[in-house]
Amino acid sequence: MTPTVLVLCTGNSCRSQMGEAILNHDLAGRVRALSAGTVPQPKVADGAIVALQLAGLPTDGLHPKLIDTLLDESIDLVVSVCDNAKESCPIFPRPVKRIHVPFHDPHGEPLDSFIAVRDEIRRVLVPALVEALGLEAKP
């Protein structure tokens, strides 16, 4: 069965959205990634959308979600990508493995910041998930 990963942030408008899109693309068929926020923003940051599109990543369907709406999902791993979300991560109905992989928050900064965070998420988060879930590295 494909493991489900929840990428958790505070606003669910930048880092966690980029993480969801990158994981679903780079680990397609190996994981199912979702994202949510503890206090979601009204929309995904424009810079996050543009940064993803510039890398050829799909952005359809990305929208901020409140963590409470996903508590009934069968989550195999929670990845907090900001310190605040790590501290306020809710208790799930069943035990869930958690890891913390923090990234700079580019919200309100120029597009270059979003691109840098996108690239760091791809470089750091993808291998961290492969290791945390015990997935075989692709040749």
Image: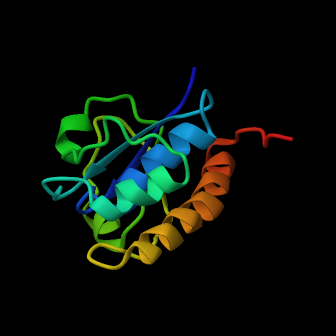
Q: Quadrant of residue 94?
A: top left
Q: Between 110 and 107, which is closer to the camera in this rendering?
A: 110
The colour scheme of the drawn protein is rainbow
State the image coordinates of residue 69 (x, y, percent, origin top left).
19, 37
For this orientation, the residue located farthest to the top is 1
State the image coordinates of residue 8 (x, y, percent, origin top left).
35, 54
Left or right of residue 66: residue 16:
right
Residue at point 31%, 35% (across, down): 61
Q: Between 10 and 74, which is closer to the camera in this rendering?
A: 10
Left or right of residue 124: residue 71:
left
Residue at point 40%, 72% (across, down): 111
Relative to 75, residue 104 above or below: below
Residue at point 23%, 61% (across, down): 11
Left or right of residue 113: residue 65:
left
Relative to 119, residue 96 above or below: above
Locate the N terminus by quadrant.
top right
State the image coordinates of residue 38 (x, y, percent, origin top left).
21, 56
Q: Between 8 and 107, which is closer to the camera in this rendering?
A: 107
State the image coordinates of residue 37 (x, y, percent, origin top left).
25, 54
